[in-house]
Amino acid sequence: MRVAYLGPPGTFSEEAVSRCDLTQGGEALPYSTFADAYDALLSRAVDAALLPIENSIEGAVSTVLDLLVLKPGPRIRREVLLPVRQHLLARPGTRLEDVRRVLSHPQPFGQCARFLRERLPQAALESQTSTAEAARKVAAGESAAAAIGSRAAADRYGLALLAESIQDSDENVTRFVLLAPSDEAPTGADRTSIAFTLDRDRPGGLHEVLGEFARRGINLSKIESRPTKRTMGHYVFYLDFEGHRAEPACAEALACVLGRVHTLWLLGSYPRAT
Ligand SMILES: O=C(O)C(=O)C[C@]1(C(=O)O)C=C[C@@H](O)C=C1
């Protein structure tokens, strides 16, 4: 399987590729942005794309949520839970007090907010396309800069760990989804992701949708909203629930939801990661 991920090599996304049963041993192809990896799947340059969707400290990876409804088509075939340890990486010999610039992907800045505030309050934070890209630039640049990223990135780009495990909480997990042309057959322990918009200004619309699941004893595991990007106050709701869309109770709930929403996107059913 050819799988697109956020590169260059050394990202957490690359590590997630090596942890997913379907992509292990396949051909992993690095792309510079989530949108590029997603487009590679749409154009069939790859068979799948593995993208982060949420983090236990920082929350939604909104770019990826937006892609799922702005360019619909790909289905979620797997979820992968990756424990994430963030480290401060710098060229060997750099001291913490020398660091004036910190480079990373925006997500790790949020995951390491306390460390940055307490230990590097003067440093400028510079967003990069990925943690590994940040490490690559720090390795190539001057010593006043550091990157936030993985141990694998430090090894690959010849950087030292200036501070270890700097995320706000020890429990730091990023959830990735493997997107493919179709989702997975039922396994008995599945999850389903959908997205929908509601008709505007109808009281109780969201409550009615949630009620279809509650009535059938279907456990919701996530709800998230994003702006539709068209009008202020109009949202796309993202919902995850336990069960497969082909199971009778879930199929019935989805049929009823279809009658209560403006637009429904079926994002896929896939085995639940533990
Ligand atoms: O920059 C990387 O290493 C990525 O794989 C991206 C990403 C993300 O966007 O969430 C993945 C996992 C971590 O939460 C930090 C960054």
Image (tube, rainbow, N blue to C red):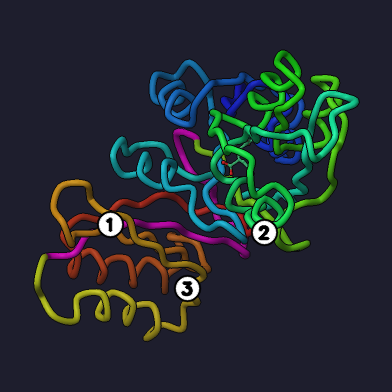
Occupied quadrant, residue 227: bottom left
Which residue type does callout 1 highlight? Val
Q: How many marks?
A: 3
The answer to which of marks 3 and 2 sits earlier in the sequence is 2
Within-10-Å neighbours for mark 2: few <14, some 14–19, many 20+? some
**Secondary structure of the residue carrying numbered label 2:** helix
Residue occupied by mark 3: 220
The reply to whether dot 3 and dot 2 touch (C-beta < 8 Å) is no
Where residue 127 appears, as percent x and y from the top left, is: 53, 34
Which residue range is magenta in the image?
Answer: 180-199
The reply to whether dot 3 and dot 1 touch (C-beta < 8 Å) is no
Q: Residue at x 70, y 33 (%)?
A: 147
Tag on residue 236?
Answer: 1
Mark 3: C-beta under 8 Å from nearest atom of ligand 1 = no
Where residue 44 appears, as percent x and y from the top left, is: 44, 19
Q: Quadrant of the C terminus?
A: bottom right
**Secondary structure of the residue carrying numbered label 3:** strand
Mark 3 or mark 2: which is in front? 2
Residue 186, placed above or below residue 151: below
Instruction: Give me the C-alpha separation between circle 1 and circle 2.
Output: 31 Å
**Secondary structure of the residue carrying numbered label 1:** strand
Residue occupied by mark 2: 114
Where residue 95 appears, as percent x and y from the top left, is: 85, 35
Which residue type does callout 2 highlight? Arg
Mark 3 or mark 1: which is in front? 1
- The answer to if 185 sits in the magenta stretch is yes
